[in-house]
Image (cartoon, rainbow, N blue to C red):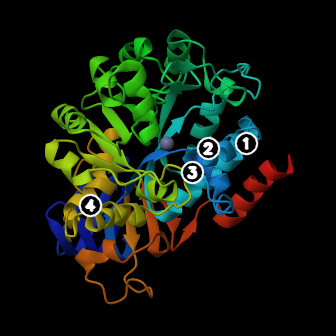
Amino acid sequence: MTTYFAEHAQLPTGTATSVRLTATDGRISAIDLRARPQSEDIRLGGVVLPGMANGHSHAFHRALRGRTHGNGGNFWSWRDQMYAVTRRLNPDTYLALARAVFAEMALAGFTVVGEFHYLHHDVHGRRYEDPNAMGEALAEAADDVGIRLTLLDTCYLTGGLQADGHLPLDEVQQRFSDGSVDAWAERLTALKDNDNLRVGGAIHSVRAVPRESLGLVAEAARGRPLHAHVSEQPAENLACQMFYGATPTQLLHEAGALGEDFTAVHATHLTDDDIRLLGGTSTTACLCPTTERDLADGIGPARVLHDAGSPISLGSDENAVIDPFEELRGLEMHERLESGERGRFNTAELIAAASANGYRSLGWEGGGELRVGAPADFIAVTEDSVRTVGSRSEQIVYSATAADVTDVVVGGEEVVVEGHHRLGPTADLLREALGLLRDL
Ligand SMILES: [Zn+2]
C-alpha cells in the first residue's frame, strides 16, 4: 500500500483540494477528501490528474522529428522518409528506440500507450526466428519504462489502393505483411496479455487490407481492441470510392468491424453517413491533432462525431510532438478555428478524451479516472512554472505542457519523480537510440 497526498486533484466530481489517494495492488483503494498530510504520504504538488492515454502511436516515427521540414512536400513524401527509417530497425535497435520514446511519453504524463505496430519482419520480409521479436521488443521497452502498453498488432496485406484495385507490396512494405489474415492471426494469438500489456488487433487501413479480408480480421480480433486508420487523406477516400463504390467507413461497417471495441484513427474526411455509422455503433474516434496538422491532413469533425455517439480519444501518432496537453488543446483549438466558437468541448470532456476514453479504447476498462477501483495511474502538474503560474487549478490543462509534469505514477508506483524518469536522463536515451539508427 502506498499513499499520495495531492494539493489539488481532478476527480470525476471536479477539482478537490487536500486529497489522499491510496494505492493497493496497483489500484486506487481509497480517496480521502479534505485530508491532512501524514508523514508516510508521498507529497504531490500542483494538480493531480488521471494518467494520460496515448491512443495511437508509431514509436519509430520519433526518428523523423525535426528532420522532414526542408522541402515542403505532403503526406506521401513524408511517408517515403518514414519508410527509409524502417530499413534501420531490427529487434535490438527497435528496443532501444522504443525504450527512449516510451520514456519520453512517461515523462510527458502518458501512462498508457497504444502502439499501432506493423513492423513485423526483417528488412527482406522474412520472419524472425521468433515471429513476434519486434512486438516483444516494444513490450520489453514498455516494461522497462513503466508505461502500460496496448500492442495493436497490425494486419497489412497490400501495398495501397488505386481506382483499379490494390497494389502489390513494395520492397519496404514486405516486412509489414504476414501474407494472409490466417498467418497474421496465428502470430497475434501467440502474444499474451499481462499486468502491463494488452494485445489488440489493427487493420492498417482499407488501403492495406482488401474488402474480402476485413471481416476475417475483425473476427480474429473479436473480444480485443481493434483499431484502423480511417480516412486520414482524401486520396484514400477517392480510391476507395472508385474501386469499391463505398467509403472506408462503409467497408468497415459491412465487415462487422465497427462497435465499442473498434477505434477509427484520424476519421478526418467523413461523410454524414460515415458519422452516423461511427456514432451509431459507439465506435471511438482517435484524433491525433499534432500529427494531423503536421501532415496537412485536415481537421476532423470531432464535436459532430462526439454528438453522434463516438467517444473521442487522442494520440500522438507520428510523435513529432509528445505532449498530452498539446493534443488535448489541439482538439479544442482546431474546433474553435473551424467553428468561430470557444468551448466546443468543456474541460471534463477534454480530460476524458485525453484519458478515460483512451484507456477504454485500448482495453483498460475503468482506467483514466481518479476513482476507487481504477488503476492507480495519475500525474502531478506543477502550478509554479512560467507557463502555469496564475492559472486556476481547474483550468490547468489550458496552460500546462509536458514540461510541467513533475510526477507520474503507474499502477501505484512512481515512474517519474520531480521531472526525472527512473531510467535516467531521457534526452540521453533518445540520443543514443537515434544514433544507432543513423550510424548503421
Ligand atoms: Zn498512424
Q: Amino acid at mark 4?
A: Leu
Q: Amino acid at mark 3?
A: Asn
Real-space Cα distance between discs 4 and 1? 35 Å
Q: Given contact means CB atoms under 8 Å apart, are the residues at marks 1 and 2 in contact?
A: no
Q: What residue do we see at 33% from left, 56% from top?
A: 354
Q: What residue do we see at 41% from left, 16% from top?
A: 211
Q: Given contact means CB atoms under 8 Å apart, are the residues at marks 4 and 3 in contact?
A: no
Residue 138 position, x and y percent, is 60, 39
Q: What residue do we see at 64% from left, 22% from top?
A: 169
Q: Considering depth in this image, is 309 or 146 the residue closer to the camera?
A: 309
Sooner in the amino-acid sequence: mark 2 or mark 3? 3
**Residue 123 shown left or right of residue 168 in the figure:** right
Check disc 4 and report its element: helix, strand or loop.
helix
Real-space Cα distance between discs 1 and 2? 9 Å
Identify the residue under disc 1. 84
Residue 250 position, x and y percent, is 29, 25
Real-space Cα distance between discs 2 and 3? 9 Å
Residue 196 position, x and y percent, is 47, 40
Real-space Cα distance between discs 4 and 2? 30 Å
- How many numbered dots are placed on residues in this image? 4
Identify the residue under disc 4. 350
Identify the residue under disc 2. 79
Q: Amino acid at mark 2?
A: Arg
Residue 172 seen in this snapshot: yes
